[in-house]
Image: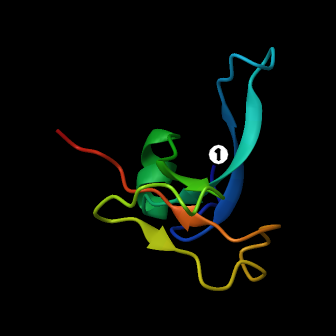
Amino acid sequence: MTGYKPGDVILAAYPSEERAGGRRCPALVVNPAQYNDATGELVVAQITSRITATPRPGDYQIRDRKDANLPRAAMVRSIGWP
């Protein structure tokens, strides 16, 4: 699972009750490549097109969706840490 770097936008499998086998949604790679190389794991943040959702601290509006290869306006949702 090498070759990903922070800032890459990928399609990730998410579980879904509506679809057997889940669905594929865009996600932002947030871990450094060295972490990925050492562990084989990938840490991502959710990307959503629900830009009218109640904002959370740390949410980030994607300014140039075309560069990210996204079909519509989107934002990266912050990760809620306890």
Please give the name of the residue rendered at 51% of the width and 62% of the height, measured from the top-left corner: 76
Q: Identify the image quadrant of residue 1.
A: top right
Give the residue number, with chain letter if any, for mark 1.
1
Please give the name of the residue rendered at 35% of the width and 49% of the height, measured from the top-left corner: 79
The local crowd at label 1, few if under 14, some if 14 to 19, many if 20 or more residues have their Cα within 10 Å, is: few
Please give the name of the residue rendered at 39% of the width and 61% of the height, measured from the top-left corner: 55
Vertical relation: 67 (above or below) 46 = below
Could you say which is closer to the camera, residue 48 or residue 68? 48
Kindly state the secondary structure of the residue where label 1 is placed. Answer: loop
Position of the C terminus by quadrant: top left
In the image, is 82 to the left or to the right of 62? left
Could you say which is closer to the camera, residue 4 or residue 60? 60
In the image, is 31 to the left or to the right of 17? left
Vertical relation: 75 (above or below) 27 = below
Vertical relation: 14 (above or below) 20 = below
Q: Identify the image quadrant of residue 32.
A: bottom left
Measured from the top left, where is residue 5 in percent x and y? 56, 67
Measured from the top left, where is residue 75 in percent x and y? 55, 66
Q: Identify the image quadrant of residue 66.
A: bottom right
Measured from the top left, where is residue 67 in percent x and y? 74, 83
Measured from the top left, where is residue 4 in percent x and y? 62, 61
Residue occupying the far left of the picture = 82
User: Colour scheme of this structure image?
Assistant: rainbow
Q: Amino acid at mark 1?
A: Met
